[in-house]
Amino acid sequence: MLAQFGFGVLVLTFLLALYSAGAAITGYVRKSFRWVESARLAMQLTFPLTTLAAGTLVYLLATNHFELQYVWSVVSRDMPLYLKMTALWGGQAGSLLFWSWLMSAFASAVTLRKWDRDREFLPWVVIVISVTLAFFLAMNIFFLDENPFARLWQTMSGDVVLGVFQPAGTFALTPSDGQGLNPLLRHPGMIIHPPMLYLGFVAFVIPYAFAMAALITGRTDDRWIRITRRWTLVAWLFLSGGLVLGMRWAYDVLGWGGYWGWDPVEIAALLPWLFGTPFLHTVIIQEKRGMFKQLNMVLIIVTYVLVIFGTFLTRSGVLSSVHAFAQSAIGPMFFVFIGISLIASFGLLIHRWGDLRDETSLGKMSMLSREALFLLAALLFGGFFIVSFWGILYPIIYEILSGQKITFGPAFYRLPVAVILGGLMVLMGMAPLSSWTFGSLKTIGRAIWKPAIPSAIAAVTIFALGMKNWLALTGFTLVAFVIFVTLYEFWRAAWGRHKTQGENIFAAFWNLFRRNRRRYGGYIVHIAMVIMAVGIIGIEVFQTTTQKSLAVGESLEISGYSIRFDSLAQFPTTDGRWVTRAVMSVSRDGKTLGELYPRYDLYPDGQPMTIPAVRSTLADDLYVVLVNWEDISQSQAPFKVYHNPLLIWLWIGSYIFIGGILVTAWPEKDS
Amino acid sequence: MGSGRLKFIVGGIFILAAVVYLIFASMNENAEFFMTVDELQARSQEVVGRNLRISGAVVGSTIQYDPQTLALSFEIANVPGDNAEIEAQGGLAAVLHAAVVDPARTRITVVYYGARPDLLRDEAQAVVTGHLGEDGVFYADEILLKCPTKYEQAVPDQAEGN
């Protein structure tokens, strides 16, 4: 009953989204304010409706309605309530509904803004968002495999079939328990990671919708960028946060000692970020100089398409990957939708290409002007995209041409990505000190020598301390360079205020942030990025690993640490897990530093989960894995240990980074 | 204006060329051939020493593990590489089962040094990365395992309490 109600609400929402798009078109054609207003209200109403549908599914999940195929596949009786509820995005069908729910939330929020000054955008924004929403709802409605409200029915011959309504000649099938969520996903990081990523994905639809509205209406000034500036920042915050959380989850749970494996699905989530990030920068140039209008359109269109593509890759089973749940029939539909979006968007862009010409010719810029450096950064991100995309695309092309399947491991990405990230760090250091239009070696040199001196001192010091790896040395020097440049920028601006306005130097700092949040918040994000780079260089260049089977009392040595196997205990938990837990003591130079408890959990259904124990310090991580096999005993156990220097800076950087974005995106009083 | 833009075009092309060069420089070394056991047998001569990724069904009775030296060896039996073919033969679980019980299937011995993975068991799907030795044994650097029986089942097998 309830499932059919939920399905009914979904269908209603779908029809409403279609109506909203249709009414917006009618309103535009008839120049009728009332039709457009009706479209706006219809789009607003999608949010309460999807909330009802998603709420119904959450209720069904929480109350063990195993007669629903989706509930049966992601929930089991032994799961705690919060996991049952978050199983909303634990599988394919629910994830799509969840996507639609977030999309309609943002759609409703957009309808609530003040539209007085940009009425002409409204119908087109409504159309773009409603069509996107309708597409995702259609996946849930028209594909039984993707329908979270589909019930299980059994035919007389014993086959199990799916259907929202009872097919003739079948009877209801109610399994007594469900399969439950994959244990790997029963982790706080995994509960927040998908919603964060999805929020980032979905929020990018809004700037795209406004970009399309600008193209269609011909209002190709920077109005659409100013309206969506904060949306873009929010999208970027969630997307970046989602990526970092995914890394954290991989590190804490998967037990392979790393944070990023260049899995195709990881790349799929990264791709929109590689276009969204330069977009965030080049829109500044459009606002300030009236340049890069065409580039900005290209960037936001591709970001949108990559958002859909990312959802498609993670959900279609096109690529074999640890993330893919199963094969599915919706792949071709996504492909068609992406194709139509690309053709329509680029068709419009070409139509308006002439209107989007730079107000000042790029040719008048010097190669070291700020405009040129921003363009260069966009190019490097483009290069990053090519490398990542090639890693997905080339294997597909190669297989079509030769019939031979190939894959790329992480090693393929290492060199190109290291070079590109190095280049981006150089730009992060140079661009803040460059001048508009006429920048030259001389003007940059005049600004840069001060921060360059401490950077050089830092480099020499690191070298003298024994750092002989040139790759890491270059990386650390660039990190120091970016930090010193940024601090110098803070100092220079604050000192200027102090001098000219007589402000106390601390007040001057405070006012800097208040007056120009975007710029100085952005600088904080730069610092955060290079601090994250410290962690990445640490683990990528200096990770060491060893493995050994230890008897109680025996130790293994890694990078100066001694790790002793003290004891092992096995016990059941209240939720039915069977836990095997080792006690290890860590020491260095004879001094005991503490204990570690690597664990191995066996779930009631036989799914094992290895949970590493990590000792994090500012200098390094010790990452100890108790590796399971059936003949484990109280006196002997195998361990794998990773030594990950500096990794903690990856997480520290990510906290600073969130702070920086909040500074940037915090609402300002309209002046 | 022409010459002004030209420097950007040249600069852009230069960067693109550098990216393409970097891709090709690391592509040749790092591409792994993804093969079935049958394909590996058929082309064993030409792929010795190359980076390979082989997928097959773990034959449980052949698993040998020495916890002292962490030496692990097992055989994998050929399963089709194509997803459509797997579906046509009744799904991954059925295909893996058929591969293991059929003594006529091509098999290859995999040797790995390291802790025994959690999911290594009879009729698991193994994807092993490494290279083929001159001796016809596959030396794996990495083992990925999937137990399909649970998570890829779309509907329950049988009715319970209508």
Image (tube, rainbow, N blue to C red):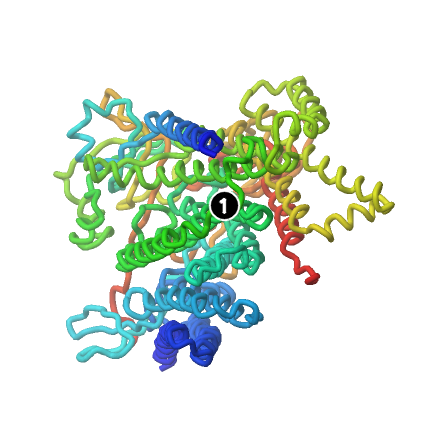
Q: A620 or A228, which lies in front?
A: A228
The residue that mark 1 highlights is: A358
Q: Quadrant of residue A173?
A: bottom left
- Which residue: 42% across, 40% down? A385
Within 10 Å of disc 1 (Cα), the crowding (few <14, some 14-19, many 20+) is: some
Residue A246 rendering spot, x and y as whole percentages: 49, 48
Picture layout, residue A212 above or below residue A525: below
Residue B135 rendering spot, x and y as whole percentages: 23, 21
Picture layout, residue B149 above or below residue A43: above
Q: Is residue B143 found left or right of A440 in the rendered image?
A: left
Residue A406 rendering spot, x and y as whole percentages: 28, 35
Q: B94 or A527, which lies in front?
A: A527
- Which residue: 35% across, 76% down? A15
Chain letter of disc 1 in the image: A
- Which residue: 78% across, 46% down? A509
- Which residue: 20% across, 53% down? B87
Picture layout, residue A449 above or below residue A1: above
| The C terminus of chain B, quarter of image | bottom left
SS type, badge 1? loop
